[in-house]
């Protein structure tokens, strides 16, 4: 994890490396994620979507793919990950305690919420959008390269249903599980499958609204008819 973090910090310090994309809040909110199991370490992506200020610290809320913790059929992995690490922009990493890993029941929603507590930190939270992506729509997927730098990849929605969205380009050469799907300046989905020779499978946030409203501060109200 250390080389990834240092590479990320160096990349963020390099002026103009990402052009105007790096100034966008919804992209600065994306962080590298590492889920450590006894016999395997999984690399992926998570996105900061909520910040709750307490008297002595900040509570940060991230969303990622639930596939880091359970099967496609919704069954939790037999082993519990002893460490779930989020790489912060200042080069540090924070561990997500077991009691702060929130998973939905069943297999309908492939999204997990992670909470970490930090001291004062210059963080940027992305805005959530609950409008379901439509066929033909263009989305930005924020991934990580092997050297730990953010990379934005365009996807066009090839198929969309209420439960999942399918892109049109293979992203498996990048770290993309848990990556956000961005429409404009809003996060509208999370990559839940990123297999070789296949386009990514994206879980739209519209299907996860009740779950997210319970676990992420500030997610209030109800989606509009289009957002359902």
Image: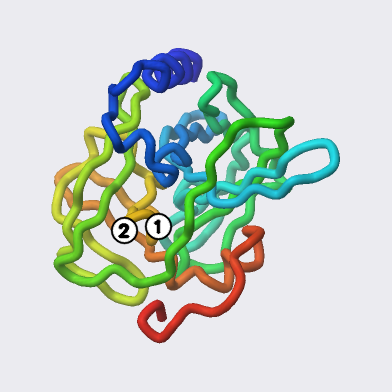
Q: Secondary structure at mark 1?
A: strand
Residue at horizontal 54 percent and vertical 51 percent from the top: 49
Residue 193 visible in the displayed image: yes
Q: Secondary structure at mark 2?
A: strand
- Percent position of residue 110, x then y: 45, 60
Residue 192 visible in the displayed image: no
Q: Is residue 28 shown left or right of residue 16?
A: right
Please name the residue that numbered disc 1 is placed on.
186
Residue at horizontal 38 percent and vertical 46 percent from the top: 179
- Percent position of residue 159, x then y: 19, 69
Residue at horizontal 44 percent and vertical 72 percent from the top: 207
The quadrant the C terminus occupies is bottom left
Please name the residue that numbered disc 2 is placed on.
183
Label pair 1/2, CB-CB below 8 angstroms: yes
Task: Classify 10 Å Cα crowding around label 1: few (below 14), some (14-19), many (20 and above).
Answer: some
Hey, which residue is sitting farthest right in the picture? 55
């Amino acid at each position: 994890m250390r080389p990834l973090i240092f590479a990320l910090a160096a990349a963020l310090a390099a002026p103009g490396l990402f052009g105007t994309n790096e100034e966008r809040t919804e992209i600065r909110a994306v962080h590298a994620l590492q889920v450590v199991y006894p016999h395997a370490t999984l690399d992926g992506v998570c996105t900061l979507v909520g910040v709750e200020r307490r008297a002595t610290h900040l509570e940060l809320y991230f969303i990622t793919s639930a596939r880091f913790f359970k099967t496609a059929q919704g069954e939790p992995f037999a082993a519990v990950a002893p460490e779930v690490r989020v790489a912060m922009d200042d080069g540090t990493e924070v561990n997500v305690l077991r009691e702060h890993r929130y998973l939905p029941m069943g297999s309908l929603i492939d999204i997990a919420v992670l909470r970490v507590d930090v001291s004062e930190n210059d963080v940027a939270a992305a805005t959530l959008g609950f409008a379901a992506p439509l066929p033909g729509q263009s989305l930005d997927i924020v991934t990580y390269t092997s050297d730990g730098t953010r990379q934005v990849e365009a996807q066009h929605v090839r198929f969309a249903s209420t439960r999942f969205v399918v892109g049109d380009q293979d992203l498996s050469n990048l770290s993309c599980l848990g990556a956000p799907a961005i429409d404009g300046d809003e996060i509208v989905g999370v990559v839940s499958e990123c297999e070789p020779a296949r386009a990514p499978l994206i879980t739209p946030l519209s299907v996860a609204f009740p779950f997210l409203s319970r676990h992420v501060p500030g997610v209030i109200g109800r989606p509009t008819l289009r957002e359902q």
